[in-house]
Amino acid sequence: MNIFSAHTSAHTNTNFILLAGYVTAMILVSLNARRKRQGAEDFLVMGRKLGTFGGAFSIAASWIWAPAIFISSQKAYEQGLPGIFWFTLPNILCFFTFVPLALKARERMPQGYSIPDFLFVRFGGDRRIHLVSLAVYLGYQLGAAVINALAGGLLLHTLTGLPVTGCILLIAGAAYSYSVIGGLRASVMTDVVQIILLLFIAFVLVPWVMSATGGWETLRQGLGGHSGLYTNIFDPSVAYSFGIPATIALISGPVADQMFLQRAFAAKRASLAKIFMLGGLIFGVVPITLSLLGFIGAAPAVQAAVSIRDPQMVGAEVVAHYLPGFATGAFIVLAFAGLSSCLDSSFAAVSSLTAIDIYRRYVAPEASEKKVLRAARIGMTAVALAGTAIALLQPKLLWCFLIYGALASSMLVPVYFSLFSDCVSKRAVFASITLSVLSALPLSTYANVAGKTGLIVAAALLPPVLSLTICGVSVLRNLRLRVAA
């Protein structure tokens, strides 16, 4: 049954009409992108002609994943000001910390496609490094597919009462249907439409909710979270339990995220830095704006009126309670735009990993463009199916966020050493990635499921500390050898 009042059920058909119109519009945009396609190079990296405007809006939209829409309001609701501070600050900073990596990657491999592609060339065709890094990058994209399909399914279920399974299949299928058509070009074009639509709806709905609930005073009363205890933005308990793992996960994210790297390799060289810095600022508006719904939900008067059954969905529940049914439909479109943007970007990112790093690297090095495109679409389809299947198991969103954040952090230090130092050995890079994944991933999974805060923090810190030790020792040893020679 639907958790909201009957008026929401009465608007279910309207909601699906809105969604059908949205998906149809995205398919039409993708078909338009496909008409411009010239071959595999355009499908995978847009002929390396991605400009500042399209790139910035695209990367901002691609990073508006489930956490930006749902965990932003959840942390504001649960942990007030410090919760949203530790979620938003590293989320924005990661765009800026990624810029030096992107510039160096393009400098060292101007015609590259991915970091595994670079590592293969950098270490003389070492297959072990290439395959273990490729596994991490594919795993990260799989995680993105899981968390966004799950969040979209939970939202539709929450607001319509329809089975979660069907809702997950709907959002995953919708994103796949138009991403497979035109590759990165289609992803970028739809991203621009999606971010504009999302921001417009947010700028209408959030002030409307504030007005309906009592304005700034209600918001102020919720700044401490639903318990009222978290008014100190630098609360040490939140900084330790959430700030440390979230910061490491978010700063590491772009390094292990082929969505970022695909756009870095696709960008015009002159536009590369501007794309990510402007994209970070555009993105930051979204979690900050949507977090206001969490603060409102935490206000005592709103808590008395609304039964928040699922903190992950607090923003949606507040909108559904205080605004008319068509506003709920607009919120669904907002969330659908953000989640499907990340999903289609994830599918597009997988296309270059499977087409270049698997098919061309190991199966058919001299394959025609037609066969490369087919391999790209097969990879997209495989990740879409696997991600949807895992999402149907319905893990917690915060678990997914922190677990695959631990996976991403296994690449943070080795990638920077590989790009910026000629003294790190391939043995050290391979060992640091492998040991980080094998230790942090199971530890993070157990810690999050069991709710062990200390272990969650340890799982976040383990990969960078371990990798820094291994790679650092390797660099110092090789420097001593060079000096001695």
Image (cartoon, rainbow, N blue to C red):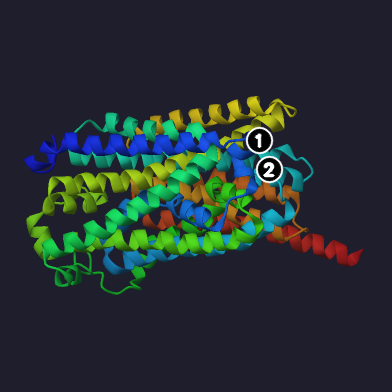
| Residue corresponding to mark 1 | 356
Give the percent coordinates (x, y) of residue 363.
69, 26
CB-based contact (under 8 Å), mark 2 and mark 1? yes
Residue 249: x, y in percent?
47, 55
Count of picture labels: 2
Q: Disc 2 and disc 1: Cα gap in Å?
A: 8 Å
Can you identify the residue that label 2 sits on?
A: 117
**Residue type at the position of mark 1:** Ile
On screen, residue 485 versus residue 273, left or right, reads right
Q: Quadrant of residue 74?
A: bottom left
Question: Where is residue 208 shown, x and y percent of the image?
Answer: 18, 60
Residue at x 7% of width, y 40% of height: 6
Q: Which residue shows up at 36% across the image and 67% down it?
A: 85
Q: Identify the secondary structure beneath mark 1.
A: helix
Establish if 438 lies above or below 287: above
At x 39%, y 41%, the residue is: 340
Placement of 1 over or under 289, stated as above or below: above
Residue 99 relative to residue 198: left or right:
right
Q: Is residue 195 visible?
A: yes
Q: Residues within 10 Å of mark 1 (few under 14, many from 20)?
A: many
**Vertical side of 74 occupied by 216: above or below:** below
Residue mark closest to the camera, 2 vs 1: 1
Q: Earlier in the sequence, mark 2 or mark 1?
A: 2
Q: Which mark is residue 334?
A: none
Q: Quadrant of the N terminus?
A: top left
Identify the element where label 2 is drawn: helix
The amino acid at mark 2 is Asp
Which quadrant of the view contains residue 210?
bottom left
Q: Position of residue 478 (x, y in %)?
A: 81, 60
Quadrant including the C terminus: bottom right
Circle 2 crowding by C-alpha within 10 Å: few under 14, some 14–19, many from 20: many
